[in-house]
Image (cartoon, rainbow, N blue to C red):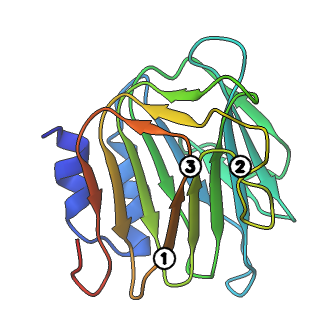
Amino acid sequence: MSTSVERSRERCDRASVPAFFAGAVAGDMAIVESTADPFQSNQIDIQSTTNANEYTIIGRNGTKVQINGGPSILEAQTVNPITGNIYVALGPTADTVRFLSKSPTADSTVPRDLVIYHSDGDVIEIGHFAEDHNPVPGFTSGVTINGELAVIPSGIGGATLRVADSTVIGPTVVSSAFGAR
């Protein structure tokens, strides 16, 4: 199993997430929801662009996003080249992360592992989902993960995981704070 997923199997608290991401290697992307209001539910959308190894990350509804330790900003960010793992850390409220397909017929692609840290009440959607959490009609594409998928709690409670029209090449680890796998 890859090092990123082995490290991800260990539960981490919110304070340790930035230190974990500081160890990311070149080519990795670490996305942290960094909105200052601890009671605001946040939404992050991630999507491949038409350029190889390039992604657009959007914080919706006032969500601030920090990428690879950079400043927290509200605007859409385009990041490249990402050739390694993608890590996402959601905040302590009921947040949503959507990893969307590139287009109705083209998958977004994760070069290696996708590791998502969640808290109680979070919603994780992989594939093309609308803001009402339903798959978008007419889309036959999703996300291709060329490594492992790990969904790991960073606090207590569980999250909702939805996957549509997507492929995971490696193992999948889904864990909750209650020990279920």
**For marks 1 and 3 on the same chain, the one whose residue lies earlier in the sequence:** 1
How many residues crowd mark 2 within 10 Å: few (<14), some (14–19), many (20+)? some
**Dot 1 corresponds to which residue?**
159
Q: SS for tag 3?
A: loop
Q: Amino acid at mark 1?
A: Ala
Foreground of the two, 71 or 122: 122
171 shown above or below 112: below
Residue 172 % position (x, y): 28, 50
Foreground of the two, 143 or 93: 143
Q: SS for tag 1?
A: loop
Give the CA separation, mark 1 to mark 3.
17 Å
Total labels: the figure holds: 3
Q: Residue at x 63, y 32 (%)?
A: 141
Q: Amino acid at mark 3?
A: Ala
**For marks 2 and 3 on the same chain, the one whose residue lies earlier in the sequence:** 2
Quarter in which the N terminus is drawn? top left
**Dot 3 corresponds to which residue?**
164
How many residues crowd mark 1 within 10 Å: few (<14), some (14–19), many (20+)? many
Give the CA separation, mark 2 to mark 1.
17 Å
**Dot 2 corresponds to which residue?**
45
